[in-house]
Image (tube, rainbow, N blue to C red):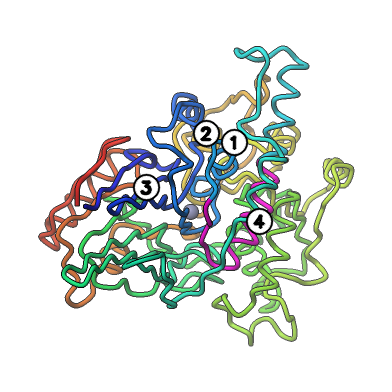
Amino acid sequence: MITLGIHGAAKTVTGSKYLLTINDRKFLVDCGMFQGRRDIRRKNWEELPFQPAEIDAVILTHAHIDHIGYLPKLVALGFKGEILATAPTIDMAKVLLADSAKIQEEDAEYRNRKGITRHKPALPLFTSDDAKLVNSMFRPVSYGQWVELGKELKLRYYIAGHILGAASVEIVHNDGNLRRSVLFSGDIGRYAVPLVSDPQPPPVTDYLVCESTYGGKVHPPSDTFHEMSELLNDVVDRKSVLLFPAFAVGRTQQLIYMINVLIKQKQIPQMDINIDSPMAVKATDIYCRYSEYHSVNKDLLGGEKCPVGGKNVILHRKRKASKKLNELKGPGIIISASGMLSGGRILHHLINRLPDPQTTLALVGFMAEGTLGRRISDGEKTVRIHKTPIEVNAKVVHQPGLSGHADSYELLHWLDRENLNPSRVFVVHGEESRSEAMAEQIRNEKGWKCLVPEMDQTIEL
Ligand SMILES: [Zn+2]
C-alpha cells in the first residue's frame, strides 16, 4: 500500500513536508519550516502527526528554508536516516541551517533581554548544535541517476531550474507485478531567465505532487535585462541608494550576474555591488564552486571565471562592515536578505533608509501574506519594524520578471509532455486561491483529476 501524507505547504506556500509511506517504509520529501503569518509559523511548534524515528530517509528538492528548515528539529526529535539531495543543495543547506539556527538563537536572546515575548522564556526552534548534527547525514545524488532506496524502490532527480541544485524527484516502486511512480515537482523555475537553467521535462508518472505558487497567474511579459538597466540608470541619475532585499540563495546571485552583464555591455556605469548578508556571501561562494550548473552567456562576462564574482562585488561578512554601509552615499547598491523582509540585515537598512525619498527599494518576486515585504508592496505608508513605526518615503519599485517560480502557463508548459497522464494530481505549495486556480486550469487543459489537499490529509494512492 502507498499513502501520501501532506504535512506542509497545503493551501499555503511554506512548510513543505510530504510523507510517502510504501508498505512499511516511510520517506519524507522535503522538510520545510513554516514561515510568514504567526498562525502559520506556530505550526513549527506543534507535535508532528508522524514519528521522525520511523522515517527511513528524507529526500530534498532544494535548499530554500521552506523546504529544508525543519531538518534540525526532525533530527532533534529522533530522525536517524539519510538525507538525499544534489551536491549544491547539500552545500547550501549546511550554511543555511547554521544561519537559521543562529538567527533564531539571537532572536530568542533579544526577545528575552527586551522582555518582548509571549513565551517565557522565548526559545529557538532549534539550536546551532542541532543544525550541526544534520551535516553528517547528507548523501549526494546527481541529476538523472537512478538511486536505490532499498528493495523494489528507487528515485531519480530532474533539473527544476528555480535555484542552483533544485530538483524534481521521481520515486518508483516496482514489486515485479506492479510499477507505480510518484513525481514531486519541487519548485519549478521559469524558462530563459538569467543564470538559472530551464526546468527539464518531467518523466511520465502515475501520481504528481505539483507546486502552484503562481497558480492562475501570469507573469507580465518583461525584458529583465532592460528593466534592470532602466532601474539602475534611474538610481545613478537620482544618486539614490538601491536596496535590493533578496533571498540569500538564488536571487542575490542572479542580481549580481545581471548587473555585471549590464556593466560589461556598458548599459550602466561601473558600480560596486554591496552584498550585505553573511548567508548570501557564503551562498555566492557556493555558486562560484558549481559554475557548470548555471546557464550563463560566457561571452558577456569577459574573462571572469565565476559568473557571480568580480572586483566590484563587495562581500560584507562582519557586522561592523554592515554598519558602515549606513554611511554609503548614492548612487549605490545594497543587496541584503531576507527577500520578503521577514528578518536579516535588510531590516536595519530599511529602518535607516525607508524614510528617505532618495532611497529606492526594489521588490523582487513573491511576497508571502503577513510579511513586511507584502505590506510595503501593498502600498502601506507606515510600517512597523522591531515594533517601531517607520515611514515609507522611499521609491518602491517592483521587478516582476525575476520571479523564481514558473507562472501557471509555464507550469502547464512544463507538464506538456507526451504520454504524461497521471491518474491523480495533488496541487500544493500555493495560497488556497492559487492552488484551486492551478487545479482548475490543469483539469480544463489536461483533463487530469486534481485535488487540493488539506493540511495533514493522508491520501491512499
Ligand atoms: Zn524554493
As measured in the structure, the alpha-carbon distance from the residue carrying label 4 to the one carrying label 1 is 29 Å
* 3D distance between C-alphas at marks 1 and 3: 25 Å
User: Horizontally, is 73 left or right of 414 in the view?
Assistant: right
Q: Earlier in the sequence, mark 1 or mark 2?
A: 1
Q: Amino acid at mark 3?
A: Tyr
Q: Residue at x 19, y 78 (%)?
A: 418
Q: Residues within 10 Å of mark 4 (few under 14, many from 20)?
A: few
Q: What predominant SS class does the magenta segment belong to?
A: helix
Q: Nearer the viewer, residue 43 or 73?
A: 73
Q: Which residue is mark 2?
A: 371
Q: Nearer the viewer, mark 1 or mark 3?
A: 3
| Residue carrying label 3 | 18
Was residue 92 drawn as part of the magenta stretch in this picture?
Answer: yes
Mark 4 or mark 1, which has the lower sequence index? 4
Q: Are marks 2 and 4 in contact (CB under 8 Å)?
A: no
Mark 3 or mark 4: which is in front?
4
For marks 2 and 4 on the same chain, the one whose residue lies earlier in the sequence: 4
Residue 169 figure quarter: bottom left
CB under 8 Å between callouts 1 and 3?
no
Circle 2 SS class: loop
Q: Nearer the viewer, residue 272 or 216?
A: 216
| Above or below for 190 versus 394 | below
**Amino acid on which the number 1 mark rests in the picture:** Ser
- In this picture, is 418 found above or below 45? below
- Using the image, determine if residue 449 lies above or below residue 44: below
Front one among 94 and 218: 94
Relative horizontal placement of residue 37, taking residue 457 as reference (left or right): right
Helix, strand or loop at label 3? It is: strand
From the image, tell me which residue sits under label 4. Answer: 136
In the picture, the disc for residue 342 is: 1
Disc 3 packing (10 Å; few <14; some 14–19; many ≥20):
many
Q: Which residues are magenta?
A: 81-100
